[in-house]
Amino acid sequence: MLLKPLATVLDIQRMSTEDGPGLRTTLFLKGCNLRCAWCHNPESIDARPVVQWNKVRCIGCHSCNEVCQNGALVFSEHGIFITAENCALCLACVEECPSGALNVKGEVFEAERLLTELLKDRAYFGEDGGVTISGGEPLLQPEAVTWLLEALKKAGLNTALDTAGLVKTDLLLRALRHADLLLYDIKLMDDAEHRRHTGGGNAQILENLVKTAPYLKESGKKLWIRTPIIPGSTDSKENIRAIAAFLAGSVRDAAERWELCAFNNLCRHKYESLDWDWGYKETALVTDYAMAELLLLAASELKGSNIEVYGTGSTRSTSTGKE
Ligand code: SF4
Ligand code: SF4
């Protein structure tokens, strides 16, 4: 057993139904090494806890500035910016703000305290449910993830690890020893497109999956692949065909399911409250017709394999099948 590490947590989401089998608790860790243009969790990108300003709630009273001893708040015509390098996270501004326009995103937990929190939820896990560790990229905190997965397994819980896979292979394999399920993102097969839309290449991600698949199969652990269906970037038939060909070749005996996850824009308010521009703010949901076409294509490309194709997320109804 490793020494008890610290974990920087964004959120603990309870009664989750989208991060593995059954009813689960999903632990979102902070920090990410990709910059997906469609990111649904922008507050998870920064590895540190940060104070965030909410433009909509701010009444412009400047009380926060009066209590900050570090000159960390910068006021401009665009609003209030908190300079992370000056901020001591004393939270005086958060306590002083009369309108709740400042709050802290993220908290550092000792792993043992986090374990106690997670174990409180075991009453609703039933036979299938359990704990999923997600992010951000959880494996940027490998000691905490491995410690928690091991402790959760020892407590008899079902465990899942949700990763984008851009990490060293040995970190992934070490954490997987204590996971029942690996949730693994494959977004784009074309490396240049992957770099353009996510800020990083896909070579390590694909290589990790190829190296991990035999271990998953031998040890009876489950592998679910997830592809976000993002209009204008991952949703081409060419991309779906290329991912299917990769799955049918390198990981066909290990993967149990492939989820195509329809884009949603529910995170728009997060970008608004951060006062960040989001290129997908006006993007409509994927149509039911387009989603059905991609699902059919994925299933037909994997015909004869044991990989089941699923669609998740909301789509937009069309009566004609066209826009
Ligand atoms: S948390 Fe403390 S240091 Fe950081 S901006 Fe607020 S008052 Fe200043
Ligand atoms: S204290 Fe709160 S409401 Fe007042 S200026 Fe600062 S963020 Fe805005």
Image (spheres, grey):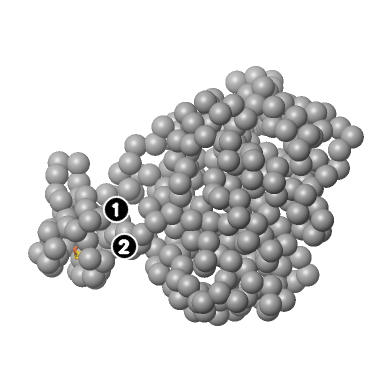
Front residue of 146 and 40: 146
Classify residue 156 by image quadrant. Answer: bottom right
For the residues marked 1 and 2, what is the alpha-carbon distance in whole angstroms?
8 Å
Q: Callout 1: helix, strand or loop? A: loop
Mark 1 vs ligand 2: CB below 8 Å: yes
Counting other residues with Cα less than 10 Å from the Cα at mark 1, is it few (<14), some (14-19), or many (20 or more)?
A: some
Q: Earlier in the sequence, mark 1 or mark 2?
A: 1
Look at 43% across and 65% down and name the residue there.
8
What percent of the width, then of the height, locates residue 147? Answer: 57, 71
Residue 232 visible to the viewer: yes
Q: State the mark number for residue 103.
A: 2
Name the residue beneath numbered marker 1: 54
Q: Amino acid at mark 1?
A: Asn
Instruction: Report whether 183 appears left or right of 303.
Output: left
Front residue of 12 and 314: 12
Front residue of 145 and 320: 145
The quadrant of the rendering that contains the N terminus is bottom right
Instruction: Report whether 54 appears left or right of 191.
Output: left
The answer to whether residue 169 is above or below residue 156 is: above
Classify residue 21 by image quadrant. Answer: bottom right
